[in-house]
Amino acid sequence: MGTRSHQQSAADLTVRCAIITCSDTRTTDTDTSGAYIRTVLEEKGYEIAAYELVKDEPEQIRGMLNAHVDNGIDAVMINGGTGIARRDTTYDVVVAMLEKTLPGFGEIFRMLSYDEIGAASILSRAVAGSIGDTLVFSMPGSTGAVRLAMDKLIAPDLRHLVWEIREH
C-alpha cells in the first residue's frame, strides 16, 4: 500500500488529542496558540481530550506527558519552551522521553519557518516523535509558529500518522 491508500484507510479514524501550552506567563485567556491548536483540531474533526497550561518545569511537563500516554491519548500537541533561553526546557524533556523520532518534522518546520522569518528559524527546536503509541509534537509557542506547524505539517496528515502507529 502506498501513502495515498494509507491516508484513505485512516480517513475515518477517531483521534484523541491533548494540547499542552508550556509557559510561565500565559493564561487560558491569553493563550492564543493553544486556542489555535484547538480550533484547527476541532475543524478537522479530531477529539480534544485535554487542554492544559503548565509552567516550563521539567517535572510538570514529564508528568503531563506520562499521564496522556497512560490514558491512551493518540497525539499530544505541545507549544512553547522550544527556544534556547534558560527557562526553555520543554524540548529537553520531550527528546529524553521520545522512543522514536520524526526528524522530518523539525527539519521541514525550520525550512518553512525560514521562508517566513529568515535566519531566526535556527532558534527553533521543534521536534516530534512517539512515546509508545502516542505521537508527540513539540512546537514553538508563537501563534505564527503554531499556525505553520498545524496547518502545513500536523493537521493534514495526523490521522495517517496515528493509523501507522496503530496498524503496524
Image (cartoon, rainbow, N blue to C red):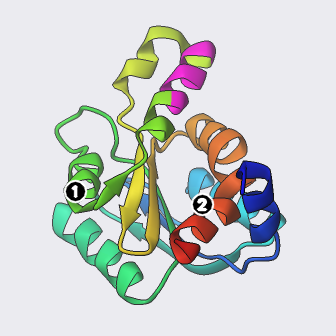
Looking at the image, which residue sits at the far bottom? 71
Amino acid carrying label 1: it is: Val
Residue behind mark 2: 161
Magenta-highlighted residues: 108-115
Q: Which of the image's four quarters has the N terminus? A: bottom right
**How many numbered markers are drawn?**
2
Secondary structure beneath dot 2 equals helix
Where residue 127 appears, as percent x and y from the top left, is: 39, 44
Identify the residue shown where x is 42% and y is 50%: 128
Farthest top residue?
119
113 within the magenta span: yes
Residue 92 to residue 158: above or below: above
Instruction: Identify whether 119 is placed above or below 74.
Output: above
User: Which residue does the image show at 28% across and 56% down from the upper left?
Assistant: 94
- Residue 142, horizontal then vertical, whole percent: 52, 39
Residue 129 falls in which quadrant of the image? bottom left
Identify the residue under disc 1.
93
Q: Is residue 29 left or right of residue 135?
A: right
Q: Position of residue 36 (x, y in %)?
A: 68, 54
Within the magenta stretch, is there residue 90?
A: no
Q: Nearer the viewer, residue 26 or 141?
A: 141
- CA separation in Å, label 2 and label 1: 22 Å
Residue 43 place in picture, x, y as percent: 83, 64
Q: Is residue 81 left or right of residue 10?
A: left
Which quarter of the picture shows residue 160? Answer: bottom right
Q: Is residue 115 above or below residue 50?
A: above
Q: Residue at x 54, y 21 (%)?
A: 111
